[in-house]
Image (cartoon, grey):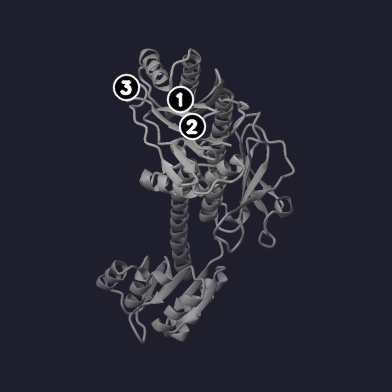
Amino acid sequence: MTPATVLVVDDSATKRYLLVSWLTRAGFTVLEAETGGEALTKLLDADVDLVVLDVKLPDMSGFDVCERIKTGPEYGVLPVIHVSAHAVDVVDRTQGLNRGADAYLVEPIEPDELIATSQAVLRYYRARQRAESLAARMVRLAETTLAINSASTLVGLLQAAAAGAHGIFGGPVVVLAETSDGDSLVAVVAAGEEQPVVRPWTLDERNVAVGSLVRTDQPADWDVVEWPADESVAVAAARLRIDRPPVYVAVPSSSQTPGFPVLRQLAQAVAAAVEAQRSYDEEHRIAVTLQRSLLQSRLPDVPGVELAVRYEPAGSQTEVGGDFYELTMLDGRLLVAIGDVAGHSLHAATVMAEIRHAVRAYAVEGHPPGAVLELVNRFMRTVLPADSATLCLFTLEPDTGRIRLASAGHLPPLLHTPEGVRFLQPRGPLLGINAARPPDLEFVLPRGGTLVLYTDGLVERRDADIDVGLTELAECASRVEPSLDAFCQRLLVRLSGAVEQADDIAVVALRRT
């Protein structure tokens, strides 16, 4: 038998002596109590595994004591064996068992009967405790698996895995994985802490084959956290592919339940989630690289006009979008365009490239902005009938500042002059819709005036009306730095730096000097 502590409760010193002697010789650690009240007090202070309880006590009946033990959450789940020399009838035994007792022995009791009954009751309760512990761990494992697969970043994934492992096994926890860039990150929950901390840390690599295993390491191998004294470390390693590094989950060895590979299953779940995250990061990086290659890499040099652009892709968990811009000199006029293809996908990025090239081609033919939009719209409705986009397009004569502007459902350009800030109001249906378009908007950009074009990622938020974002943009653009690059950077930081971007952002600023 696994060592156990028994509380013997009996007001008869002689009978208590016999019970204590028998149980002690059988290898139990025995505590004593003379009354029900004393027994209930000792149960709160001592770690007891079994109660041997006389039915007839001076302060309360053993039935009442048993019922309080079984119904009081402060006592936990404790087995109780009734013993009695007086309450020996069937009615008494039935009452004792109905009120929570696990066994009922009638005196005279044989020592072997008492020992065998105690061992049987303890075997049942310990099997029940193991089953309940495993069930609770499996529930927490399922919750942790859901949390790590719901994480939007590798750091969040490691935090969820470490917090889940701490909830399952308790004690200090270490979760180690490698980013797609080859950097090792470790999430640590120290003893007595609840929140994981993520930081760089490298393990002296062992050769781990594809698959999963659980091994025992020395605490010195995992000195990123302080382990309990005289404790080894149970380490689960999982590796899904030979070209991927393994993922590790380390917990105290004493937390393991033999025969139930919960730690191994957790490591496998973390490895699968890390692999999915790495694959997505790699695909996203490739897509963003492709998208950037489709955008203009060099701005034209226009005497009398200062230009600046900014493009920021959405957060790492959002697919690439269709934001684009174009700045080109054509026959002495500067062509400026900014647009946004509906959707977030590689397809949206390729549609963006087609629209951008179409705008350049029709503008090279000498068409004014409104006519270019008509032609691009016809092109989209013929070649890309399932897609739509917004576009703002204008031409500028650098010498005179004369602008001719047309819009296809795009957000209003912002004009900053010494008189203040205001939004222009060009109208027009978005591209992909067969509808009449209004005449172009014509005006003169004064010397020192700044015109700002942008896409909706700069001002649109899921939890606020777009008018709120436009108002914030107007307030932020009320001051324009001497450097337009610094001005555009401030717009990005102020308007989109508080939270992870959910959409691409393109900003074009133009100032007549």
- Callouts 2 and 1 close, C-beta under 8 Å: yes
Residue on which the image places disc 1: 348
Name of the residue lying farthest toward the left: 91
Tell me which residue sits at (34%, 31%) in the image: 427
Q: Position of residue 344 (x, y in %)?
A: 45, 30
Q: Eyeballing the image, is 134 above or below 370?
A: below
Q: Which mark is residue 433?
A: 3
Q: Position of residue 452 (x, y in %)?
A: 49, 37
Residue on which the image places disc 2: 319
- In the image, what residue type sits under mark 2? Glu
| Residue 14 or residue 209, whichever sits in front | 209
- In the image, what residue type sits under mark 3? Ile
Local secondary structure at mark 1: helix
Local secondary structure at mark 3: loop
Q: Earlier in the sequence, mark 3 or mark 2?
A: 2
Side of 286 where 128 appears, left or right: left
Name of the residue lying farthest toward the front: 400
Tell me which residue sits at (32%, 22%) in the image: 433
Decide if residue 261 is in sight here: no
